[in-house]
Amino acid sequence: MCIFLHFCLPHILPKLVYLPLSAFNAHALGALAEVAGPGLDGPLGTILPALLTAMGYTDMVQSLTKKAAETVVTVIDEEGIESLLSELLKGVGDIQASIRQSSAYLIGYLFKTSDLYLVDGAPNVISTLIILLSDSDSATVTIAWEAFV
C-alpha cells in the first residue's frame, strides 16, 4: 500500500480531482479514501477543495461526493487532523456559499463521528461556526447551526 500511495497517488489524484468532478471520479475518491486511510493526510489540500466544490453540485455527483468527503473525514488520523481542520476552516471562509455550506457540514460530521482527540481544534471551530450563524446565505446559517447539534 505504501508503494502505491508514494508512487501512484501523485499521478492519479490530479485526474480524479479535476473539476467539474464526475460521478465516477467522486466514487473513485471515496473508494481511494477507504483504501488509503491515513495515507490521505498529505494530499488533503488537493482532495478536499475539489470535494467541497462538488458537494455544491445539484445532481447525482453531489451525493457521491458527499459520501466520498465523509469517508475522507473519517479515515484521517491524529497526524492529519490539523491539516483537515485547516482545510475545512479555509472552506468556511470561502466566498462561495456552497463551499461554506460543505465545509460547515463536514466540520459537524467530523465532530459527531470521530473518535479522535479534537479538543485542541474545538475553540477555533466553534468561533468560526458562530460567525457563520450570521452569514448572508440562509442555507449556510442552517448548516452551521446543524454542525453544533
Image (cartoon, rainbow, N blue to C red):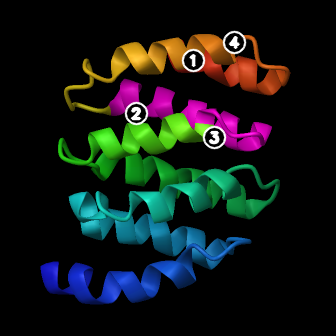
SS type, badge 4? loop
Above or below, comparing residue 22 to residue 137 in the picture:
below
In 3D space, how far apart are the residues under numbered discs 4 and 1 (Cα atoms)?
7 Å
In 3D space, how far apart are the residues under numbered discs 4 and 3 (Cα atoms)?
15 Å
Identify the amino acid type marked 4.
Leu
Residue 42 x, y percent position in the rendering: 30, 62
Mark earlier in primary sequence (2, 1): 2
SS type, badge 2? helix
In 3D space, how far apart are the residues under numbered discs 1 and 3 (Cα atoms)?
12 Å
Does the magenta run of residues contain 69? no
Which of the labelled discs sits on residue 102, or is there none?
3
Residue 36, can we see it?
yes
Q: Picture quarter containing residue 90?
A: top right
Does the magenta run of residues contain 111? yes
SS type, badge 1? helix
Say if mark 4 contacts mark 1, CB within 8 Å. Answer: yes
Q: Residues within 10 Å of mark 2 (few under 14, many from 20)?
A: many
Which of the labelled discs sits on residue 133, or is there none?
4
Identify the amino acid type marked 3.
Ser
Say if mark 4 contacts mark 3, CB within 8 Å. Answer: no
In 3D space, how far apart are the residues under numbered discs 4 and 2 (Cα atoms)?
19 Å
Residue 20 x, y percent position in the rendering: 74, 71
Residue 93 x, y percent position in the rendering: 64, 33
Which of the labelled discs sits on residue 129, or is there none?
1
Residue at figure coordinates x 28%, y 40% from the top left? 81
Give the magenta-colored segment's residue range: 92-113
Which of the labelled discs sits on residue 110, or is there none?
2
Residue at figure coordinates x 38%, y 13% from the top left? 123
Mark earlier in primary sequence (1, 3): 3
In 3D space, how far apart are the residues under numbered discs 3 and 2 (Cα atoms)?
12 Å
In 3D space, how far apart are the residues under numbered discs 2 and 1 (Cα atoms)?
14 Å
